[in-house]
Image (cartoon, rainbow, N blue to C red):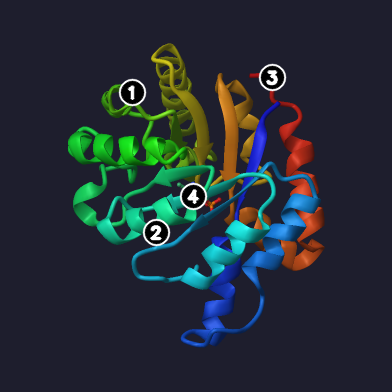
Amino acid sequence: MLKLGVNIDHVATLREARYRGLALGEPCPVEAARICEAAGAHGITAHLREDRRHMQDRDIWRLREVVKTRLNFEMANSVEIVAIALKLKPEIVCLVPERRQEVTTEGGLDVVGSETSLTETRKRMNDAGIEVSLFIAPDLRQIEASARTGAQFIELHTGQFAEHVADAAKGESELQRLIAGAGLAHSLGLQVNAGHGLNYENLAALNRVPHLVELNIGHSIVSRAVFTGLSAAVTEMLGLMKSYRG
Ligand code: PXP
């Protein structure tokens, strides 16, 4: 069964829009995590950015106490954040690019260009009992490099797909890249997640991408929650995901 990890960063984004710099305010991302889990989400994803744009340190520690399913800690491969992750002990970390030189043209992590440092971090995380995922574009060279790092997962960046899905030719070509990428990753022993820009409308097209384990979805769920409430928004997404056959 395809799993849903709800990315709750945008709940914190909304809070920070009003309460930045204050250790209080609504909406509370920890409460959001509770509601998502109660609605059936299989995991909670949160990104502690180096600039603390949305999630704050106190959120991450509270999430660690509260999340009962699986905490996926999105993070840059930086000294400060690696140290936090090793103390936090999420079930899994997803390494994402934050600095320009770590980013490929399509927005995923440049694993080819930082294979040595990513391998080092991968080892440190695994030694602490934390699984590792790398957020990459569906680029065959990046996938091969990801396998060489020894990571357990990749998360395929679906941003280009989401952006072009309305254009039949471009959308199909992006979908083909995801299909090929997932196939290669699976053949190399990597487990495959996907995320970025997925929503209630474009999700169905992903049914053609094989081997997907988990989708990480944030913005569309948090946006729908404004009108329906978070529990209903998660339930509806889970309902749509049931049609995935792998
Ligand atoms: N996966 C990763 C690695 C991300 O950085 C993000 C965005 O924070 C997401 C998934 C979720 O993207 P969206 O908010 O567009 O659903």
Query: Closer to the observer: label 4 or label 3?
Result: 4
Secondary element at tag 4:
loop
Q: Position of residue 136 (x, y in %)?
A: 36, 37
Per the model, the C-alpha gap separating discs 1 and 4 is 23 Å
Say if residue 168 shows up in the picture: no
Dot 4 amino acid type: Lys
- Vertical relation: 42 (above or below) 6: above
Q: Residues within 10 Å of mark 2 (few under 14, many from 20)?
A: some
- Vertical relation: 151 (above or below) 94: above
Query: Closer to the observer: label 2 or label 3?
Result: 2
Of 50 and 172, nearer the camera is: 50
Q: Residues within 10 Å of mark 4 (few under 14, many from 20)?
A: some
Residue at image position (80%, 52%) is 38
Residue 147: mark in rendering: 1
Task: Judge left or right: residue 49 versus residue 230.
Answer: left
Residue labelled with disc 4 = 89
Secondary element at tag 2:
helix
If you read the primary sequence from the N terminus, does the residue marked by circle 1 or circle 4 appear first?
Answer: 4
Per the model, the C-alpha gap separating discs 4 and 2 is 9 Å
If you read the primary sequence from the N terminus, does the residue marked by circle 4 or circle 2 appear first?
Answer: 2
Per the model, the C-alpha gap separating discs 4 and 3 is 32 Å
Q: Position of residue 134 (x, y in %)?
A: 38, 37
Quadrant of image for the C terminus: top right
Residue 245: mark in rendering: 3
Query: Closer to the observer: label 1 or label 3?
Result: 1
If you read the primary sequence from the N terminus, does the residue marked by circle 2 or circle 3 appear first?
Answer: 2
